[in-house]
Image (spheres, helix red, strand yellow):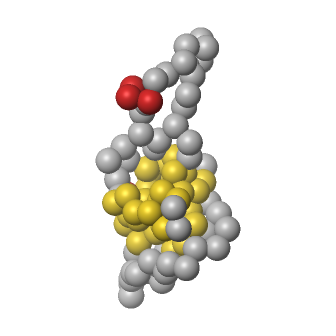
Amino acid sequence: MSVKLKPLADRVLVEPSAAETTTASGIIIPDTAKEKPQRGTIVAVGGGKKDEPMTVKAGDSVLYGKYAGTEITIEGKEYLIMRESDIFAIL
């Protein structure tokens, strides 16, 4: 996947995973009740700050906060741009 966007400093561009459509027991979740995904795949990373190199890289699967990042649309696709510090873990 190639996105023509280069995040600055300690920011990363994340493609959120698809929201769950059914529960573990098989109940279908309507669009209005779907939880915002809290995991995704890093698409692009910034160059880091002077004294803080980036610890994540493109292709990493990550967990982030429920309200982390800013939603943006690039070529009709939804992404989140957030600071590396908003990421909790690499999966």
Query: Residue at point 47% right, 41% down?
Result: 37
Question: Where is residue 6 shown, x and y percent of the image?
Answer: 49, 80
Q: Decide if residue 37 is on the left or right side of residue 61.
A: left
Name the foreground residue: 29 vs 85: 29
Q: Is residue 41 visible?
A: yes
Q: Position of residue 86 (x, y in %)?
A: 37, 57
- The image quadrant that residue 70 belongs to is bottom left
> For the N terminus, which image quadrant?
bottom right
| Residue 57, visible in the rendered structure | no
Measuring from the top left, give residue 49's x and y in whole percent.
Answer: 39, 83
Farthest bottom residue in view: 50
| Residue shown at the point (43%, 59%) measured from the top left | 80
Q: What residue occupies the far front of the structure in this picture?
A: 76
Vertical comparison of 25 with 18: above or below? above
Q: Residue at x 60, y 49 (%)?
A: 91
In this rendering, position of residue 61 left or right of residue 19: right
**36 or 50, which is in the foreground?**
36
Instruction: Reply above or below: 29 against 90.
Output: above
